[in-house]
Image (cartoon, grey):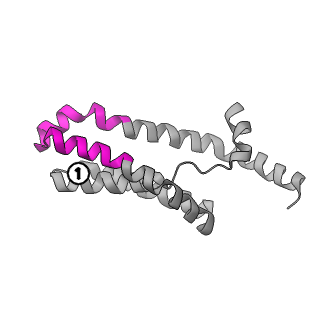
């Protein structure tokens, strides 16, 4: 692919995708911080111990860290359109599933799966073009 064609495609994607992806990044931030804001009420409602809560909050990031690279390698194989759409839908369903996580086991399972789903979403933009996206 020629450099001019690649630059044109990247510019088109930047204009069309970046606002949508920015909105998803904001939602991801809210999703991550929401577990901390809801801690006290969630523990009262479910009877979850401090230890189980801390494990669930931490397991998300452990899974997220371990699956980040494999998930993005899989994205290159399947294609960004399919991968980002699928992981975003899965992430949304799992976030909603937190409403039914009323036991310790359900909480840990949903947090683990949520970490796996979000690992497939970040980072997806090619590093050679990231400076232009950040500057925009």
Could you say where residue 54 lies in the image, as x and y percent from the top left?
24, 40
The residue closer to the viewer here, 88 or 50, is 50
Residue ID for mark 1: 107
Q: Residue at horizontal 57%, vertical 39%?
A: 22
Q: Residue at horizontal 71%, vertical 31%?
A: 135
Q: Which residues are drawn in magenta?
A: 33-61
Could you say where residue 19 lies in the image, as x and y percent from the top left?
62, 40
Label 1 neighbour load within 10 Å: few <14, some 14-19, many 20+: many
Judged from the image, the secondary structure of the residue bearing numbered disc 1 is helix
Could you say where residue 121 lies in the image, as x and y percent from the top left?
51, 52
Q: Residue at horizontal 43%, vertical 54%?
A: 66
In the image, taking residue 103 as reference, residue 122 lies left or right, namely right
Camera sees residue 58: yes
> How many tags in the picture?
1
Q: Which secondary structure class fits the magenta region best?
A: helix
Camera sees residue 136: no
In the image, taking residue 130 as reference, residue 84 lies left or right, namely left
Indicate yes or no whether the magenta region holds residue 109: no
* Quadrant into which the N terminus falls: bottom right
In the image, taking residue 104 as reference, residue 123 lies left or right, namely right
Vertical placement of 118 versus 35: above or below? below
Residue placed furthest toward the bottom = 77
Q: Residue at horizontal 76%, vertical 49%?
A: 10
């Amino acid at each position: 692919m020629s450099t001019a064609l690649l630059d044109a495609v990247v510019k088109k994607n930047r204009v069309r995708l970046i606002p949508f992806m920015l909105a998803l990044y904001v939602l991801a931030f809210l999703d991550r911080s929401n577990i901390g804001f809801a801690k006290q009420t969630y523990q009262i409602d479910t009877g979850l111990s401090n230890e189980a809560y801390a494990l669930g909050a931490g397991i998300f990031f452990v899974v997220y860290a371990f699956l980040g690279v494999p998930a993005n390698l899989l994205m290159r194989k399947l294609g960004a359109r399919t991968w980002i759409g699928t992981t975003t839908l899965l992430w949304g369903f799992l976030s909603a599933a937190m409403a039914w996580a009323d036991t310790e086991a359900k909480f840990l399972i949903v947090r683990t799966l949520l970490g796996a789903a979000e690992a497939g979403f970040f980072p997806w933009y090619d590093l050679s073009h990231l400076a232009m996206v950040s500057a925009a």
